[in-house]
Image: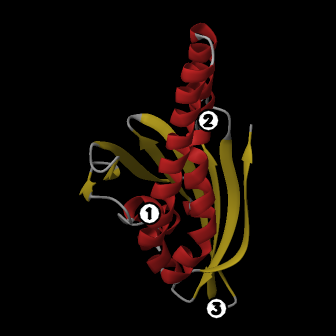
Amino acid sequence: MAASYRRLERPISGAVAILVALVAGVAVLLLPLLWGVAVALAALAAIRLPLFRSRGTTTLVTDADTGAVRDDFESACPPPLSFQWGIADGIERTDDGWTYTVSYLFGLRSVEMTVECNEVDDGDLELVATAGGRSWGTYYVTIDERDDKTVIDVEHRSDRRFGLQRLPQWLVARRYREQALEAQGYGVVERDAGLSI
């Protein structure tokens, strides 16, 4: 699923960047110089302006026991972050968790995402992600056994606002999220994800 996500997300993100560049270029060419520059700068600022946060809850179920599920969430490949570790060029162990190196722009640029797993009240887990040294998102994970099944409640929220250039990533991830979780052995019972300003 991570490969499918990447194949769809990269062209869409590239198309958005090209569209903004075209708007900026046309504005500079067709409008008086100062107006054209103003429109070009406004277009570039609008796409990068931090406008929204993502948040949501997901309830998962699996036949695996609670210990195996806990191991999955504490591993280098926690199920909710499959689109991060799944497209990473490299994964390294750190003192507190894992670091994923992800390249983009045809390998010209890369970013490091670090995920730390902490135990919180009553044995629940908290996955804290940073990207490029800045806060990225937090996942709160509760693992319970119910009726011979293991039920996992995941609440996530972004810890910073994102610009419109990140919207294609969010939309494509939303499309493939359920399939990615099922591929890892987790059935999705309920899912609610959205954006807030």
- Provide the residue designation for mark 2: 161
Quick check: can you spot residue 82? Answer: no
* First along the sequence among labels 1 and 3: 1
The picture places residue 91, in percent across and down from the top left corner, at 27, 58
Between 195 and 48, the residue placed more toward the observer is 48
Label 3: how many Cα within 10 Å (few below 14, some 14–19, many 20+): few
- Residue type at numbered disc 2: Arg
Please tell me whether residue 58 is drawn above or below residue 184 in the rendered image.
Answer: above
For image coordinates 44% across by 66% down, the residue present is 7
Which numbered tag is attached to residue 90? none
Left or right relative to 112: residue 83 = right
For image coordinates 45% across by 56% down, the residue present is 10
- Provide the residue designation for mark 1: 6
- The image quadrant of residue 197 is top right
Left or right relative to 98: residue 138 = right
* First along the sequence among labels 1 and 2: 1
Label 1: how many Cα within 10 Å (few below 14, some 14–19, many 20+): some
Tell us which disc is closer to us: 1 or 2.
1
Q: Are marks 1 and 2 in contact (CB under 8 Å)?
A: no
Please tell me whether residue 189 is drawn above or below residue 168 in the rendered image.
Answer: below
* First along the sequence among labels 2 and 3: 3
Please tell me whether residue 30 is drawn above or below residue 141 in the rendered image.
Answer: above
Q: Disc 1 and disc 3: Cα gap in Å?
A: 36 Å
Q: Disc 2 and disc 3: Cα gap in Å?
A: 40 Å
Q: Disc 1 and disc 2: Cα gap in Å?
A: 22 Å
Label 2: how many Cα within 10 Å (few below 14, some 14–19, many 20+): some
Tell us which disc is closer to us: 1 or 3.
1
For image coordinates 34% across by 43% down, the residue present is 111
For image coordinates 41% across by 51% down, the residue present is 115
Which numbered tag is attached to residue 148? 3
- Residue type at numbered disc 1: Arg
SS label for mark 1: helix
